[in-house]
Amino acid sequence: MRWNREKIGSEHPYRSALHNIFDVLLNVVIIVAIVAIIRTFIVSPYQVEGNSMIPSLEDKQYIIINKIGYIVGEPRRGDVVVFRPPSDSSKYYVKRIIGIPGDEIAIRNGKVFLVIENEEHELSEEYLDELNANRTFRAPVGSGDRAEDRYIVPEDNYFLLGDNRQGSLDSRSFRNEIGEPIPYVDREYIAGRVWFIALPITKSHALETPDYGVDVQE
C-alpha cells in the first residue's frame, strides 16, 4: 500500500501565488491611502506658474504647502498661500495674505496701510524688490495710479496681493462675469500655506511669515 504524504509546512503553489498577489495589492492600497491622506490633510506639492510672486517665488519652482496648519489654525497676515481665486475656481494661484477677516486695507500712493481704529499703519514689506517697493497701485495694477482704494475684509474672507505688485492678478483685479470687483477670497478656497521651496535645490529654503511691525490682534 502506498501513502501520499504532504510535507509539514509545505504549501500548494497556487495558494502561495494568491497569497503573494494579495500581499502586494494590500501594500499598494495602504501606500496609496497614506499618500492620499498626506496630500489631502498634511502637505502637497505644487509648481509655480508665472512671475506674480517674484522675487519670493519664481516661475517653474516646485513648492510644498502645509495644509494641516490651516486645519488646526487660521491663515495669518503675511502668509504666502495657494488658493482658488473667486474669478475662476478651477485654477490655483499663489499670493500673499495682506488682509484677514475684519481688516481695513488702504492702498494709496504706492503703499499699503492697515487701518486700526481710524489710524493708518504702513505695512513694512521688506520682501518686495526695488521694482515693486512703494509701487502697489490700484487696478489696473501696472497703471501707476496712486489714487486710494480701500477694502474692508468680510468674515471668513481674505485680501491677497502678489509680491510682483505691477504684474500680479490678485485681489485688486478679480472680477466676476459682468466685470464687478470680487476682491476677497473665501476661507474654504485656501488650500494651504507655502512651507518651502523644494526645487531647484539651489534655491530650496523655507518661507517665513513676515513681521509687519503692526501691534494688532489677529
Image: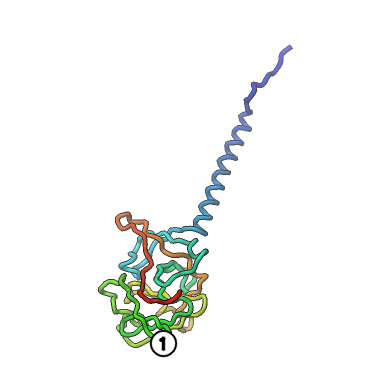
User: Can you say whether 197 is above or below 32 in the image?
Assistant: below
Front residue of this view, candidates 93 and 179: 93
Residue 10 horizontal/vertical position (percent): 62, 25
Residue found at x 59% / y 34%: 17
x then y, percent, for residue 166: 32, 76
Report the residue that reaches farthest toward the left: 130
Q: Position of residue 61 (x, y in %)?
A: 35, 60
**Toward which corner of the image does residue 127 lie, by quadrant?**
bottom left
Question: In the visual, does 109 lie left or right of 15?
Answer: left
Q: Which residue has dot 1 on it? A: 118
Look at label 1 and name its amino acid: Asn
**Which quadrant of the figure contains the C terminus?**
bottom left
Q: Residue at x 48, y 65 (%)?
A: 191
Instruction: Report the label total.
Output: 1
Front residue of this view, candidates 203 and 29: 203
> Which sits in the foreground, 77 or 193?
77
Residue 193 x, y percent position in the rendering: 43, 65
